Image (cartoon, grey):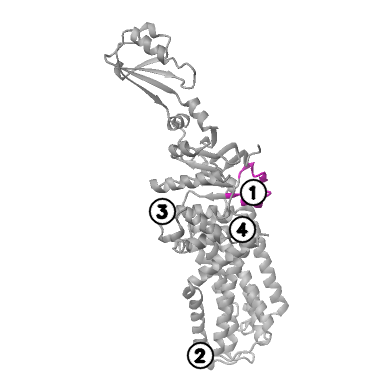
Amino acid sequence: MTPIVSVKDVQKTYDGGFEALKGVSLDIRDGEVLALLGPNGAGKTTLISIICGIATATSGQVKVGGHDTVDDYRAARSLIGLVPQEINLEPFETVMNTVTFSRGLFGKPRDDAHMERILRQLSLWDKKDAQTKELSGGMKRRVLIAKALAHEPKVLFLDEPTAGVDVELRRDMWETMKDLKSHGVTIILTTHYIEEAELMADRIGIIAKGEIKLVREKEALMAELGKKQLVVELSERANGIPESLGKYDLTLSDGGSEIVYHYDSRKDRTGITRLLNDLQAAGLQMSDVRTEQSSLEDIFVDLTKGDAR
Amino acid sequence: MNLIAIKAIYIFEMKRTFRTLLQSVVAPVMSTSLYFVVFGAAIGSRIDQVEGVSYGAFIVPGLIMLTVLTQSVTNAAFGIYFPKFIGTIYELLSAPASFLEITAGYVLAAATKSLAIGLIILATAFFFVDLQIQHPVWMLAFLLLTCLSFSLLGFIIGIWAGNFEQLQLVPLLVLQPLIFLGGAFYSVSMLPELWQTVTYFNPVVYLVSGFRWSFYGLADVPIGWSLLAILGFTAACIFIIGLIFRTGWRLRD
């Protein structure tokens, strides 16, 4: 399947000499939700800005729906909706006017039914005649989303959509995203909230220092990098791992009161039953047993360690 | 051609005008009317006629130009500077619209506003002075071209400006002197010869002269030159805006 967005060797050096993107290549599949994770200054916003036409790449090529974003910008841009990170709104304009303006700017004829549908979905219908400056921060962010959806885009970029947003609104936004996805809209989401990426994304990309460190299926990524460990609490502290247990990958922790076993939960044989039997045979008294799995957050921290500026 | 985008920008900008009617239309009309009262009615009656036209009537075309030029520049400059200032420019840059379409939307809206102001001032002038318009079609053409070309200039200034001070700088420090020294209040022939020569380097002279010709048939420079000057100026502005959008100067990172 041809990707809906294709980024090839995109490099961006700012006038000051700062290299924000060091040859990024990325294919985004039609209809997927891709979460881009990365620390501040990693290049997430720069990448989105280049795809959307707000910034120009120093070199490289971007295609959206098969259209080059420079040579065939009209076709490419009309497929894209962008929700920027900063809340930028015309303060004295009403919600309805500002959203209608966005649709017109993208060359779509007026469609009152569509406007009403979007505003209702984002709980903005009651506020349609309010000036945007009268709205709360969360409401303003909804207006930004409504603006981005006004021209019925095929690809939606959400740059930190839930930053500084309360729980209720975040849930609403997730619902909106799910609804859009079910209508075939491709969503690219940058976020700091790993929980959000875990919940929403089909694939996860990690970007740091202007480079894509990895792009994987979320499930695969978590299985591949998500180590699982079994922690056995002992009734009495052990001085060391008994020799008879040398074949297992065991470590002592908490001053000898816990034995930790690392294993792969996807394997047919995890070795847990045998280990427990052998522990008993070695004369160790177990008081409790628990398992732990590293979250996406741990993986993220591991990968980008020392990369934050 | 994304005509819908031009229309969207135009309507959005016109809504701003109607929202700020007092500041954007009433204020300039009011201040120009004061000139009519002072120079036309009060002092004007004590000043000799200029080339057969009463002084009060003589200054009307120049005064209209004074207001229309400044209004065109400030309106268009503010129109594009404001999205830059509040950050909504991202939408214009990411829209499937060409530089010509975006410029057209903002410039047409700014020009419409200053054209309306010019016409209201003209109508007001009839209350204070005895006016005649010999070439009404040319009068309208000059007015329209001036509104358009100086809105284009304002658009460039709005893109160039990095803060509100710079936004005010050009109209105050450059335009105002050019207009006052451009023959709005006097005929160039009233100046000493040296200053006459200097004056011909002032582009506003050609505008005021052409515009006044459409009223009274009086011109400091041949009417063809006036027309050429304003068309040349318009072309130069469009060319510069084209360059700005192609290079992304002050717009794109």
Residue A190: image location, x then y, percent: 50, 42
Q: Looking at the picture, tell me which residue is in the foreground, A150 or A280.
A: A280
Which residues, given as a range, are shown in magenta?
A: A57-80
The alpha-carbon separation of the residues under discs 1 and 3 comes to 31 Å
Tags 4 and 3 on a common chain: yes
Q: Is residue A76 magenta?
A: yes
Residue designated by label 4: A108
Identified by mark 2, the residue type is: Ile
Dot 3: chain letter: A
Q: Residue at x 67, y 44 (%)?
A: A66
Residue B230: image location, x then y, percent: 67, 72
Tags 1 and 2 on a common chain: no
Res. B185 in view: no
Q: How many marks?
A: 4
Residue A156: image location, x then y, percent: 55, 47
- Assess disc 1: are there few (<14), some (14-19) or many (≥20) residues with their C-alpha within 10 Å of its C-alpha: many
Q: Secondary structure at mark 2?
A: helix
Tags 1 and 3 on a common chain: yes
When asked about the image quadrant of residue A139, the answer is bottom left
- Assess disc 4: are there few (<14), some (14-19) or many (≥20) residues with their C-alpha within 10 Å of its C-alpha: some
Query: Looking at the rendered structure, which numbered label has been put on residue B43?
Result: 2
Q: Are marks 2 and 3 in contact (CB under 8 Å)?
A: no
Res. A229 in view: yes
The alpha-carbon separation of the residues under discs 1 and 2 comes to 63 Å
Residue designated by label 3: A137
Q: Is residue B133 magenta?
A: no
Q: Looking at the picture, tell me which residue is in the foreground, A119 or B68.
A: A119
Residue designated by label 1: A76
The alpha-carbon separation of the residues under discs 4 and 3 comes to 28 Å
State left or right for residue B110 relative to residue A126. Answer: right
Q: Are marks 4 and 3 in contact (CB under 8 Å)?
A: no
Identified by mark 3, the residue type is: Gly
